[in-house]
Image (cartoon, grey):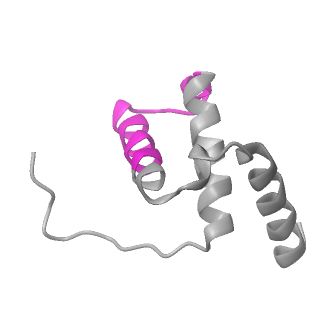
């Protein structure tokens, strides 16, 4: 299947990408999507996003992955006041 010519390019900070990847991956593993998915296409789009993030990130393959995610969450909370 070919990619559409009209795409959307997003830029995320590394911390944002890592935290989002962790959340998406956790939702996939626990099959929590079922409670919020209205249409199969939404789940497919989320899987695709997770795959794109996974192909860009090196942190998920590091032995200290959990610590890296915790640190990224902390930095995002500080940065955005959450």
Residue in the foreground of this view, choosing between 70 and 4:
70
Where is residue 79 drawn, in percent x and y?
83, 77
- Where residue 49 appears, as percent x and y from the top left, is 43, 50
In the image, residue 11 above or below residue 65: below
51 versus 30 height, above or below: below
Determine the residue positioned at 62% across, 69% down.
Answer: 14
Image quadrant occupied by the N terminus = top left
Residue drawn at point x = 42 percent, y = 39 percent = 47
Please check the rendered image and state whether residue 43 is part of the magenta-colored stretch, yes or no: yes
Q: Residue at x 83, y 69 (%)?
A: 75
Query: How many numbered callouts?
Result: 0
Res 41 → quadrant: top left
Magenta part of the chain: 31-51
Q: Position of residue 81 (x, y in %)?
A: 90, 73
Residue shown at the point (69%, 42%) measured from the top left: 63
Q: Nearer the viewer, residue 66 or 10?
A: 66
């Amino acid at each position: 299947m070919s990619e559409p010519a009209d795409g959307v390019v997003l830029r995320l900070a590394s911390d944002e990408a890592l935290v989002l990847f962790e959340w998406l991956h956790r939702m996939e593993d626990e099959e929590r999507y079922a409670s919020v998915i209205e249409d199969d296409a939404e789940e497919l789009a989320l899987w695709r996003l997770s795959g794109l993030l996974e192909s860009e990130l090196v942190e998920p393959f590091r032995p200290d992955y959990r610590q890296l995610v915790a640190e990224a969450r902390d930095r995002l909370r500080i940065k955005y006041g959450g």
